[in-house]
Image: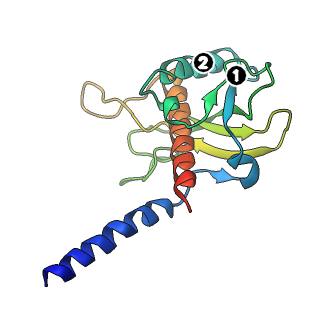
Amino acid sequence: MRLRSWMGLVLVCGALPLKAAGKKLAGKVLDVAAFGQIRSYCIDTSRLPGWEAIDVRDLVKTESKPRGLLSKLPWSRVHDCTASGEDAVIRIKFRRLTVTAVQAGPVPMLGEGSPGLSPGSYQWRALLRVFSPGSSRAIYEVEGNPLNYGLGENGAPREEPGHILRREAAYHAFWALAADVKRISQRP
């Protein structure tokens, strides 16, 4: 009986990495071969308008530190995208969404119709795309949504300023990228 229990435990533990490796990706890998060749990257903010570029640069500065989100990527970051030495260029584009209606009950992801958001309020989403240098065709893309809303004085969710929502959306897009790279590297 004990041997059977131990064998069952060994089989379950052996299946855990396969289950984790089989999880669905948060983003879309559009070119598997090119995505698998990435060893270095840069983050291009040159196409973003003023405040959006500042939000992304501040996030990158904060999350590039040890134990930061970008340190979880197995790729090395090149600080200058014009110094053609990177394998990939990451670009972020923000979309502002206006809430048109509020639904009753829980909604899995904050967004249009989320509880606590009033009609006419807005939120930001970040579309993160990974490109091969010199190419206009993305090899990976994922969308990040801001998920943390603070509570106001009366305990109800309050609307955060746009720069905080943009930063959170970009953070979640980078988090999804790091999680997807980890999942892909675990696959046999």
- Going by the numbered disc 2, the residue's amino acid type is Arg
Quick one: quadrant of the C terminus? bottom right
Q: Which residue is most to the bottom?
A: 1
Q: Please give left or right for residue 104 compared with residue 136 in the image.
A: left
Percent coordinates x, y for residue 76 in the rendering: 61, 29
Determine which quarter of the picture holds residue 68.
Answer: top left
The foreground one among 120 and 169 is 169
Viewer-proximal residue among 102 and 188: 188
- Quadrant for residue 144, please give it: top right
Residue at position x 59%, y 22% from top?
Answer: 56
Which mark is drawn over residue 57? 2
- Name, please, the residue furthest toward the front: 3
Is residue 164 in sight in this rendering? yes
Compared with 91, 176 (above or below) is below
C-beta proximity under 8 Å, tags 1 and 2? yes
Earlier in the chain: of badge 1 and badge 2, it is 1
Residue 142 image-quadrant placement: top right
Q: Determine which of the numbered discs, if any, sits on residue 45 in the image.
A: 1
